[in-house]
Amino acid sequence: MKRLLLILVVAIHAAYAGAGVPLTESDGVWYGEISVGSPPKTFTVVFDTGSADLFLPGKGCTTNCSGHTLYDPSESSTSSNLGTTFSLPQGQNETVSGELYSDTIIIAGFLATGQTLGVAEKYSQALEVSHFPADGILGMAFESISAFHAPSVVETLITQGQIKSEFSFKLAVSGSELYMGGTNTDLYTGGLTYTPVTNESFWQVTVDAMLRDGESVLSNFAAAIDTGSNVIYLSQEAAQAFYSVNGGKNATLAPGSSHYTHYTFPCNNFPSVAFTIGGTSFKMSKESLDLGPVSLNSADCVGSIVGSDIAKDLAIIGTAFLTNVYTSFDVGNKRVGFATLA
């Protein structure tokens, strides 16, 4: 009896031990491997906290899918056609569309069975392999924003007892990792500063302040923490105010023709920028603020803080900031944590 109890305890601990997935960076977006189906087949996906659904290019996809690894449900003994089509916006005025299936998804050795996924018959131009090297996108936000009306892979893993209710990211030039089932304490120093999720849709939190050269330019604003975006989107008004000093200027070629407004600073005169979250200030490096010169030998560099119509009521804090911190997403306690990278 004692031996049986010991085996059960070991099994439970094994189920709740965390594990990491190495990540690769491309144009400010990080992706890693998952396995799908039975027998399992490997795909690469962007792990995106700004969406909640998983989609992959299907065997029958003929639009913008060339070069990606294709998912064939007929090759998996655990796949099931759910009899529903889907269409997701992806890129400017473009969509990804196809059919919904369920199958087994494996991340870092953890199995999500009966997971809903989109099998695309059409990809948007933004997902063509020369722009987007990953095969698909795996959303890690809350079910309430799922276009499939289904739990995210993370929520399924938690419900099925595979992992503890937390996952974490280190996003850097090297040594990047998604850690499933907790945090990797080797990758950060000190404790995590947590702040509550204020709306269980995106990973939405309240940011205490955004500081430019030590002065607040924006305070107490709602923001979504988004690993699938490579820049920081502020409202048009907030972005204009941020760039109003230090030689900042509007770099949009045709103002009014786009929902996004890009700005530049003189390459030698970028301000210092920090975000205060949960009472703790986290600085951005100049490298994360600077997307590079406007053109070869230009004295002006494009900033990673962008004005956007879509960010009027909800700022989007992407990897331009997240590369400066270790970030934890705690589903069970509905909070996001930040720490200094080791």
Image (cartoon, grey):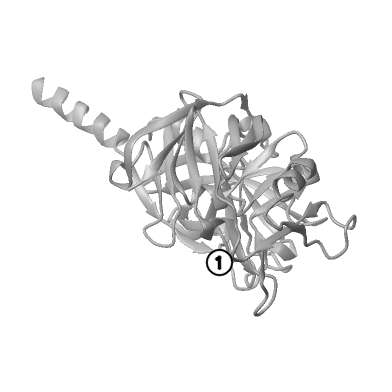
Helix, strand or loop at disc 1? loop
Q: Residues within 10 Å of mark 1 (few under 14, many from 20)?
A: some
The residue at the far top in this view is 1
Q: Relative to residue 187, is residue 208 drawn left or right? A: right
Q: From the viewer's perspective, is residue 273 above or below residue 251?
A: above
In front of the other: 51 or 292: 292
Residue 198 lies, in percent from the top left, at 61, 24
Residue where numbered disc 1 is placed: 69
Quadrant of the image for the N terminus?
top left
Tag count in the figure? 1
* Picture residue at 74% right of the left edge, 53% below the top: 97
Q: Determine which quarter of the picture holds residue 292.
A: bottom right
Q: From the viewer's perspective, is residue 225 above or below residue 42?
A: above
In front of the other: 298 or 193: 298
In front of the other: 73 or 58: 58
The residue at the far right in this view is 256
* Picture residue at 48% right of the left edge, 41% below the top: 282
The residue at the far left in this view is 2
In front of the other: 270 or 31: 270
Residue type, label 1: Thr
Residue 85 lies, in percent from the top left, at 74, 46
Residue 314 lies, in percent from the top left, at 71, 35
